[in-house]
Image: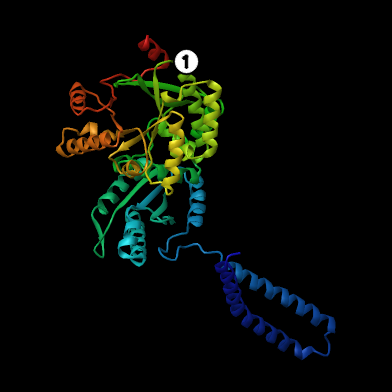
Amino acid sequence: MLYPQQKERSHRFMLALRTGLPLFFFATILTFARLSEYIQNIPISFYFIALIVLSVSIYFIFYMIYRGFDEQITDPVTHTFTRTKVISILEDEINKYQKYSIVLIAIDNLSDINVRYGTKAGDKVLKVISAEVGNFFTDKGFDKIPIGHFNGGNFLLGLSDDISTVKPFLEMMYLKFDDYIIDDIEVKVKGAVVDKSLSTDVNALSERLFELCETEYQEEAKTSIEEDDLSLLELHENVKYAIKNKSLSLMFQKIKAEENIVQVSIKLRGKDKNIIHQKNFMPVVKRLGYEREYDELVLEKVLELNRSLKNISFAFNISPSVLRNRRFMQRFKQMAKDKNISNNRLIILLSEKEVYANMQRYNDLLQEYRALGLRFVLDNVGVLNASVEYIKRLEVDIIRFDKNFSKHVSFPAYHALIKAYIVMAKEMKMKSWVKMVDSKELEEIFDDLKIDYIQGNQISKIVSYDQLKEELL
């Protein structure tokens, strides 16, 4: 047991003792004072029994007081419910009401506030925002709103209505918190909403809310259930089925380059052969702990392609966390050996939001893979992720620009940035790759910039395996 836990336990015991001892002495004195009048007529055994009953009662009181200190239902900083309590309430209410929505409110820049202004200021921001959110929905006619501090700057609250009713109020709340200032501190608030039509599992809905809030653009984070969303329970079952039965659907897009190269995109096929798109199944794969199993399955499929289709290279995604797993590396070496494939036709796309802590270890592992013949692409370069830091610290072969460079390359800032990246890449002996090139005009611009790999519908449509074979003939 940790020292703070020991101190907490002794502190609770002393509080219980200080609370219970006066009751014990008062009850003892009162009892024996009343019995003293009849002391001649009461047998000795009665006193022993009374003492035992009183002792047990007082012990029980001590115990209940001691345990009562564990029953904290509100957060001391925000005075909202604790995570455990709010989840418990939401679980009760989601089954009680026919229509029910769960809302996530996130203070997006809380960590920056804590660093810049101190944790005391951060605590005040938490308290003010939680109160404002609760008051806002109360003013809109929602009664007895369960709102709880989930973690960090995140709050969960439940509203007894469906998403179509709640969402307009949420949009109004975004306007309220636009350019919101507390004691000259700028506070950025975002959120998301789901309802019980997606699932009645509060923990699953909470995960879905965080996924929505983590989308790249705020407009996407504000959206509700998309048309191709399955219920979460159904989605989980279909993902499990697809991975267990190796039910993958592979699509391909040719790249304009000096070599024959295609990017492989993956979809899963569920129980009824329904297609599950990557944006929907990848969060579930991670949540269920199937990430390595999924990546091994993808690798197995790509290695089969490598053996059946000669003189063509395949670019595909592998999770960086899986790639850094030694067991995965051993698995790859064994699979490559068994299938007798050419490793130099495998190109792995890498993208992470956060920088991996042990960069030297990461780079050493990449170099082991590269020594086997694999090539690596740092994806989504130029967006808010770890790619720029990785360019400085990791030895890779190709950088692939974020899609916004294709959309906005005609803007002076984007044009200047991509030119600078290309010069840097050439000096570092890396090649450059641009995606989502959907017009002849864009193709000509990137040809003039001397991009090594150009990808998009202007170059080639996304095709099935059979269509790819026909194109290669």
Residue 273: x %, y % from top left: 49, 22
**Residue that extends furthest to the top in the rendered view of this protein:** 473
Quarter of the image with the N terminus is bottom right
Residue 166 image-quadrant placement: top left
Residue at which label 1 appears: 308
The residue at the point 50 percent across, 53 percent down is 89
Does the image show residue 197? no
The residue at the point 43 percent across, 32 percent down is 370
Disc tally is: 1
Near-viewer residue (63 or 13): 13
Please name the colour scheme applied to the rendered image.
Answer: rainbow
Q: Secondary structure at mark 1?
A: helix
As drawn, is 52 to the left or to the right of 16? right
Disc 1 residue type (three-letter): Ser
The residue at the point 20 percent across, 21 percent down is 440
Quarter of the image with the C terminus is top left
Does the image show residue 224? yes
When the figure is inspected, residue 22 is found, relative to residue 69, above or below; the finding is: below
Residue 262: x %, y % from top left: 36, 22
Residue 286: x %, y % from top left: 48, 39
Q: Residues within 10 Å of mark 1 (few under 14, many from 20)?
A: few
As drawn, is 234 to the left or to the right of 469? right
When the figure is inspected, residue 354 is found, relative to residue 54, above or below; the finding is: above
Residue 40: x %, y % from top left: 83, 90
Residue 69 image-quadrant placement: bottom right
Near-viewer residue (402 or 27): 402
The residue at the point 41 percent across, 52 percent down is 157
